[in-house]
Image (spheres, rainbow, N blue to C red):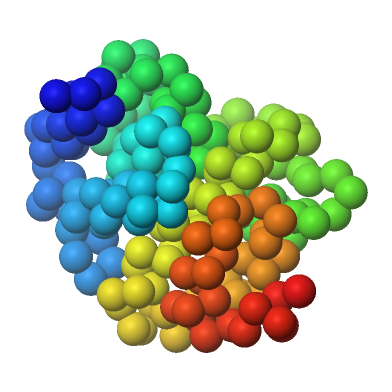
């Protein structure tokens, strides 16, 4: 068994111990959504750290999903399970205040506000790319199986992720175009 598989399995066991498999999320349960998000990221060719972050992206809760499995004061627990780089992305994703972050994408300076600390800063390009890839996978995973969510988010997400084209993987962008019925030519 490889290191990725060991970390993946350990993360799933941890989240099961926190009842993520019984926690409602969209039209399913949280653990199913997390596993499917990680699988989607992997199918797009992302690194193991990004896939592990996709698997654990809701551990601290998010702006739109308030249930958390760990308090941010317990970050070291997740570091021990999935590693420092993957946990750092989980924290970054969970701390995103989307209403202030999303409109600044594709502007000269991207502003990011950490909802836990209130700190406002310009994220480095690598973290920005990884976070946007994770945001895309999260929303595509839900939209591809839940029609009501897809219809509700289509106008906003198709516009947002079209602006993100230069920041996300080609496979992720192609998935967005298919799920939200956006032509590649309109996104150019």
Name the side, left or right, on which 18 lies relative to 102.
Answer: left
Q: Please state the horizontal and vertical placement of residue 160, each as a whole percent of the image.
A: 65, 67
Q: Please state the horizontal and vertical placement of residue 179, each as a whole percent of the image.
A: 45, 78
Q: Is residue 5 above or below residue 66?
A: above
Q: Residue at x 71, y 56 (%)?
A: 166
Q: Please state the horizontal and vertical placement of residue 147, each as a whole percent of the image.
A: 34, 83
Q: Please state the horizontal and vertical placement of residue 133, each as a whole percent of the image.
A: 53, 50
- Residue nearer the viewer, 65 or 181: 181
* Position of the N terminus by quadrant: top left
* Position of the C terminus by quadrant: bottom right
- Residue nearer the viewer, 169 or 86: 169
- Residue nearer the viewer, 169 or 67: 169
- Residue nearer the viewer, 186 or 156: 186
Q: Residue at x 65, y 41 (%)?
A: 128
Location of residue 161 (image quadrant): bottom right
Q: Residue at x 43, y 18 (%)?
A: 84
Name the side, left or right, on which 101 lies relative to 50.
Answer: right
Q: Is residue 144 visible?
A: yes
Q: Is residue 167 above or below residue 79?
A: below
Name the side, left or right, on which 54 lies relative to 172.
Answer: left
Count how many numbered circles sit on residues in the image: 0
Q: Residue at x 16, y 31 (%)?
A: 9
Q: Is residue 64 visible?
A: no
Name the side, left or right, on which 12 lies relative to 151.
Answer: left
Q: Is residue 188 above or below residue 135?
A: below
Q: In the orientation shown, which residue stands out farthest toward the right?
A: 108
Q: Is residue 171 above or below residue 134?
A: below
């Amino acid at each position: 068994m490889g290191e990725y598989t060991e970390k993946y399995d350990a993360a799933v066991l941890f989240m099961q111990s926190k009842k993520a498999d019984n926690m409602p999320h969209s039209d399913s349960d949280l653990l199913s959504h997390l596993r499917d998000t990680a699988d989607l990221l992997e199918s797009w060719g992302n690194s193991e750290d990004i896939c592990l972050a996709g698997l654990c992206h809701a551990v601290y809760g998010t702006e739109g999903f308030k249930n958390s499995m760990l308090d941010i004061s317990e970050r070291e627990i997740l570091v021990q399970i999935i590693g420092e780089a993957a946990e750092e992305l989980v924290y970054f994703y969970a701390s995103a205040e989307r209403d202030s972050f999303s409109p600044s994408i594709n502007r000269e300076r991207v502003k990011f506000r950490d909802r836990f600390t209130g700190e406002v800063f310009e994220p480095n390009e690598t973290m920005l790319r990884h976070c946007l890839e994770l945001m895309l996978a999260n929303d595509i995973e839900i939209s591809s199986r839940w029609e009501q969510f897809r219809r509700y988010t289509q106008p906003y997400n198709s516009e947002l992720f079209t602006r993100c084209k230069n920041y996300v993987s080609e496979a992720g962008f192609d998935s967005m175009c298919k799920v939200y019925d956006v032509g590649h030519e309109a996104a150019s």
